[in-house]
Image (tube, rainbow, N blue to C red):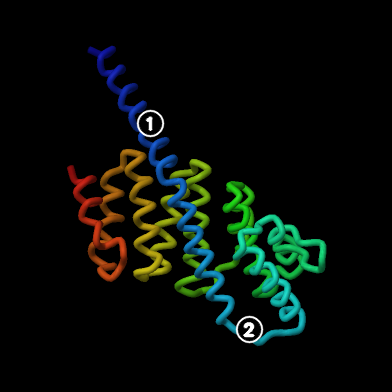
Amino acid sequence: MTDKKTKENVANDGNKLDAQETIINKYKKQFLYGLVAVIVVVGGYFLYHNYVTLPHEREAEELLYKGQDYFTTDDYEKALNGDGQGYPGFVVIADEYGNTPSGNLAKLYAGLCYAKQDKFQEAVTYIEDFDQCGDQMISPAAMGALGNCYANLDRLDDAVKTLEKAAKLADNNSLSPLFLIQAGEIYESQGKKDDALKCYKQIKDKYVGSMQYADIDKYIERVSR
């Protein structure tokens, strides 16, 4: 009897591992799409947000604009490390101007560049160093990006905790449901249906105007079986 239970436990553990690997492989591109959404938010935020600052900040801001050009054309290597023609790269901007708003934002851009190159550990280093702006868009977007990176490093507990925190911080129809769906799917891969259900029900109850709302009943039904 004991041997039979042991075999069943081993089989169940194997199924959970298979599910976990499947969810990461299946949704890896979707995690990256989440980063693309973050990129749009970051770019839009910086273009329309004006800082009244010292010359040091204005210099950093001008350099960051050039980096954004490379970033938006997917030239992540030049965006990160410079072009040899006067633009030093996000890494240098983050290092030399890190105490300015533009230098702080360069940390986030550097992290996103690394993530787009599938260098998730490097991405984590820079995004973790990014100082939150105290807003409902760019800060939770950065946190969501960090959660995505954790997921791609198989740090699933860190991923769900960070994604849920990002969703709470944003508390809007644009970002919160995206991060809650991702967190819920990771919970499912871990066999934690109750936790996944909580994520999905938040979308059902709070984010009626979101794109994810239309399909949320399918998610809820799946984990309620």
Give the image location of residue 126, x and y in percent: 63, 57
The one of 83 and 96 positioned closer to us in this rendering: 83
Q: On screen, 43 above or below 146?
A: below
**Residue at left 46%, top 58%?**
34
Which element is circle 1 on? helix
Give the image location of residue 75, x and y in percent: 66, 58
The 10 Å Cα crowd at callout 1, few under 14, some 14 to 19, many 20 or more, is: few
Which quadrant, please, contains the N terminus? top left
The one of 128 and 50 positioned closer to us in this rendering: 50
Which quadrant, please, contains the C terminus? top left
Q: Amino acid at mark 2?
A: Tyr
**Residue at left 38%, top 68%?**
174
Instruction: Identify the residue under disc 1.
Output: 18
Count of all numbered marks drawn on residues in the image? 2
Give the image location of residue 214, x and y in percent: 24, 61
Which badge, 1 or 2, is on the more N-terminal residue?
Answer: 1
Which element is circle 2 on? loop
Instruction: Identify the residue under disc 2.
Output: 51
Q: Quadrant of residue 189?
A: top left
